[in-house]
Amino acid sequence: MTIEMSQKPHDRLAAALSSEMEAVSQLIRERMSSEHAPRIPEVTAHLVEAGGKRLRPMLTLAAAALCGYEGPYHIHLATTVEFIHTATLLHDDVVDESSQRRGRPTANLLWDNQSSVLVGDYLFARSFQLMTEPGSMRVMQILSNAAATIAEGEVLQLTAAQNLATDESVYLQVVRGKTAALFSAATEVGGVIADAPDEIVRALFDYGDALGISFQIVDDLLDYQGQEDATGKNVGDDFRERKLTLPVIKAIALADKEETAFWTRTIERGKQDDGDLEHAISLLLKHGTLKATQADAMEWAEKAKAALTPVPAHEIKDMLIDLADYVVSRVS
C-alpha cells in the first residue's frame, strides 16, 4: 500500500490501518444494533457515521501494530474505545444543551434528551460486553477505570467550570479525566493485548495521556479562535456555556478589578449580554492568554513525542509523532 506523505497524519494512519479500521466499522455496526429498540441504531448511527476521524480507536490499532499484534482482539478493544467515546458525546450534548456536533444537529436536538441519555447508557453497556471478550483482566481494569475517570472528570467540570477560583491544576485534572483518560487507555490496551514489555506499555500510556491533554487544550483554544466550518461547532460555545477553560483561567489570573467583575458576571452568575463574547476575546488578546495556551498545547505535544522514545523504530511510530505535531498545528 502506498501512503501519500502529503496526507494529514491521521489520514496516513487510517490508510496504514485500513483493513483493521474497516473491521472496527463492521463490528460497530453489528454491536450497535438492537432487535427490540430501533431507536438505538438510529441515534447511534447519526453520531457514529457523522464523519468523525475515529482517532481513539485508531490509536488502539496503532499501538497494537507497533507491538506486533496480529489480532483479533485489538478490533474488539478499538470498538470498545469508540463506544465509550460515543456514549460520552451523547451525554455531553445533553449536559451542555448543545445543538451542533461535527457540523450536524445533535442527537438530543433531533430526538430528545431521554433518547440521548439512554442510548449513551446502552453504548456504555455494549462497551463493557466488548471489553470482556479478549479475556484479559488487565484490559478490563484499564478500560473500566477509564470509563469511571471520564465520568469523574465530567462531574468535576460541573463544579469547577463556573468557579473563578478554578486554577490551572484543577483544569488539568478535568482534562485528564474527561479527555486524556480515554486517549491513554486506548494506547495502553493496544500494548497490553500485544503482551508488550512494561516499559513499552508505559510509553504508550504516557503518549496517549500527553496527546489527549494537548488535544483538549487545542480544542478549548479553537472555541475562541476557530472557524465554525472547520471545527464543526459554534465559536464561543464554551463562553456561552460558562466553562472556565485554559485561556480564560489564565486571563482571570491577570485580571484587574474591572475585568474580574466582568468574568464574575458572565461566568459565575451567567448574566451575558450582546457583545460579551467579543469583549471576552479582547481580554484574552490583551493578556496574551491565547498564545500562552497555545504554548502549553505545544509543550504537551512535545511530551507525547518524547514518550515514544523507548518504542522501537516503526512506520506507525513516525505517524504517531507526526500526529502530535498536527494536533497543535491546528492553532499555529
Image (cartoon, helix red, strand yellow):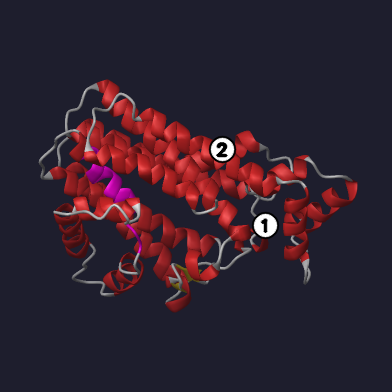
Q: Main secondary structure of the magenta part?
A: helix
Residue 184 x, y percent position in the rendering: 37, 38
Instruction: Count neighbours of disc 1 (C-alpha within 10 A) and say few if under 14, some if 14 to 19, many if 20 or more.
Output: many
Q: Nearer the viewer, mark 2 or mark 1?
A: 2
Residue at left offset 73%, top offset 52%: 284
Instruction: Report the residue marked by disc 2.
Output: 172
Instruction: Count neighbours of disc 2 (C-alpha within 10 A) and say few if under 14, some if 14 to 19, many if 20 or more.
Output: some
- Up the image or down, 132 lies above or below 51; here it is above
Q: Nearer the viewer, residue 243 or 1?
A: 1
Residue 62 highlighted magenta (yes or no): yes
Three-letter amino acid code at disc 2? Leu
Residue 278 x, y percent position in the rendering: 74, 64
Q: Which residues are magenta?
A: 52-64
Residue 245 x, y percent position in the rendering: 63, 49
Residue 215 x, y percent position in the rendering: 47, 47
Nearest to N terminus: mark 2 or mark 1: 2
Left/right placement of residue 16 relative to residue 168 reads left
- Looking at the figure, which quarter contains the N terminus? bottom left
Is residue 182 visible in this depiction of the protein?
no
- Up the image or down, 76 lies above or below 118; here it is above
Three-letter amino acid code at disc 1? Arg
Residue at left offset 24%, top offset 43%: 62
Question: Residue 182: which quarter of the image?
Answer: top left
Instruction: Report the residue marked by disc 1.
Output: 242
Q: Element under label 1?
A: loop
Question: Residue 132: which quarter of the image?
Answer: top left
Q: Residue furthest right?
A: 257
